[in-house]
Image (cartoon, rainbow, N blue to C red):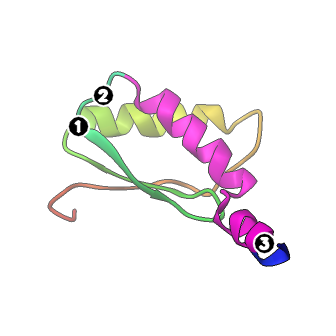
């Protein structure tokens, strides 16, 4: 029984991941060309973008969200072409 419980806890997101996922969802609402790739254990958000305007909007929103509350590592935004 302990193994099953431990396994379930292992698959659960960290607190930083939960915060990052909520922030990304809020900050990317209404965008069509921004897509979450993953959230690292430390809460670093990695996402792709097509439009620089939408990338900048999401980055500004994420920065503002972390000013007065839990600070997360800077997000990484990559265009589909890898730039």
* Pointers 2 and 1 in contact (C-beta within 8 Å): yes
Residue linked to disc 3: 6
At horizontal 78% and vertical 72% (from top left) the residue drawn is: 6
Please state if 56 lies on the left or on the right of 45 as rendered: left
Q: Image quadrant of residue 81?
A: bottom left
> What x and y, as percent, mark residue 54?
30, 33
**Label ID, residue 76:** none
Q: Image quadrant of residue 55?
A: top left
The number of discs equals 3
Of helix, strand and loop, which one carries label 3?
A: helix
In the rendered image of this protein, does residue 69 appear above or below residue 42?
Answer: above
Q: Nearer the viewer, residue 63 or 50?
A: 50
Badge 1, how many Cα within 10 Å: few under 14, some, many 20+?
Answer: some
Q: Residue furthest front?
A: 1
Of helix, strand and loop, which one carries label 2?
A: loop
At horizontal 39% and vertical 31% (from top left) the residue drawn is: 57
- Which quadrant would the N terminus be assigned to in this image? bottom right
**Label ID, residue 33:** 1
Of helix, strand and loop, which one carries label 1?
A: loop
Q: Image quadrant of residue 50?
A: top left
Q: Which residue lies furthest to the top in this view?
A: 30
Q: Residue furthest bottom?
A: 3
Please state if 32 lies on the left or on the right of 69 as rendered: left
Which range is magenta?
A: 4-29
> What x and y, as percent, mark residue 20?
60, 46
- How much space separates mark 2 and mark 1, taking CA atoms? 6 Å
Badge 3, how many Cα within 10 Å: few under 14, some, many 20+?
Answer: few
At horizontal 42% and vertical 35% (from top left) the residue drawn is: 58
Badge 2, how many Cα within 10 Å: few under 14, some, many 20+?
Answer: some
**Prevalent SS, magenta region:** helix
Residue linked to disc 2: 31
Nearer the N terminus, badge 1 or badge 3? 3
């Amino acid at each position: 029984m302990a193994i099953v419980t431990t396994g379930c806890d292992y698959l659960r997101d960290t607190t930083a991941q939960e915060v990052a996922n909520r922030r990304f969802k809020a900050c990317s609402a209404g965008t069509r060309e921004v897509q979450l790739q993953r959230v690292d254990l430390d809460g670093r958000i990695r996402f792709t973008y097509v439009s620089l305007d939408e990338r900048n909007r999401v980055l500004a929103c994420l920065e503002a969200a972390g000013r007065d509350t839990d600070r997360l590592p800077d997000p990484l935004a990559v265009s589909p072409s890898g730039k």
